[in-house]
Each structure stands twice: as structure tokens, then as C-alpha cells.
Image (cartoon, helix red, strand yellow):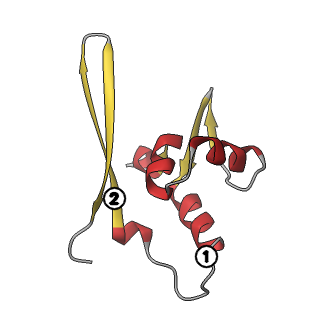
Amino acid sequence: MFADNLLTVHEVQVVTGLGRTTIYQLIRTGELPVVRIGRSVRVRLETLKRFIADHEDDPSPPLPLQISYRIHRSTKGSGDGRTSSYSIRRRRGR
């Protein structure tokens, strides 16, 4: 699904291990291109993979992010409040 290819800043934090401020600084300087929808900021998964590959020290073949890890988002809500939890799970068999 198309929305699965757009990551929130929090999901980018989980995947990269970078801090929120660092990610927003990369966005502000244009190093990490984003999609803006209203006040929402999203990062395309392909853009993040390219960003990571461009910043690798070793010119060896890049690790395929789409094969190694998948972000799982589960939303639980009752009434007004909704809480989201994120986890990264290693994909099996590839």
C-alpha cells in the first residue's frame, strides 16, 4: 500500500537510531528530502534507503533494507485517545 512507503519522523528514528533533532536538521538542510502534507512530514522509504546508501563509509554493496527489516505499526485506541507503538522485526527467509 502507498502509505506503507511513507515513514513518520518517529519511524525514521527507529530505523536509523538518529535523534529527532538530527532528523529535522537533515530535513531543514535538504539532505533528507521529505513529502509535506499539510503540517505532516513524511519520508519515502526509497529516499531513506538512498540516503543511508549515500552515507555508507564502505563502498561494498549496500544491505537491502527492505529485505532485512520491516516496520510494524500497531494502533490501539479507545474513544478519543489513540496510542501507536512501533517495532522493527527482521524479515524471515530472504
Q: Amino acid at mark 1?
A: Glu
Q: Position of residue 10 (x, y in %)?
A: 48, 41
Q: Residues within 10 Å of mark 1 (few under 14, many from 20)?
A: few
The C terminus, quarter of image: bottom left
Q: Amino acid at mark 2?
A: Arg
Image quadrant assignment for residue 24: top right
Classify 41 as above or below 94. Answer: above
Label 1 secondary element? loop
Determine which residue is flagged by label 1: 56
- Of residue 45 and residue 27, the one placed in the foreground of this image is 27
Q: Position of residue 62 (x, y in %)?
A: 51, 80
Q: Earlier in the sequence, mark 2 or mark 1?
A: 1
Q: Position of residue 47 (x, y in %)?
A: 59, 59
How far apart marks 2 and 1 lie (CA) works out to 20 Å
Determine which residue is flagged by label 2: 70
Classify 16 as above or below 28. Answer: below
Q: Which is more foreground, mark 2 or mark 1?
A: 1
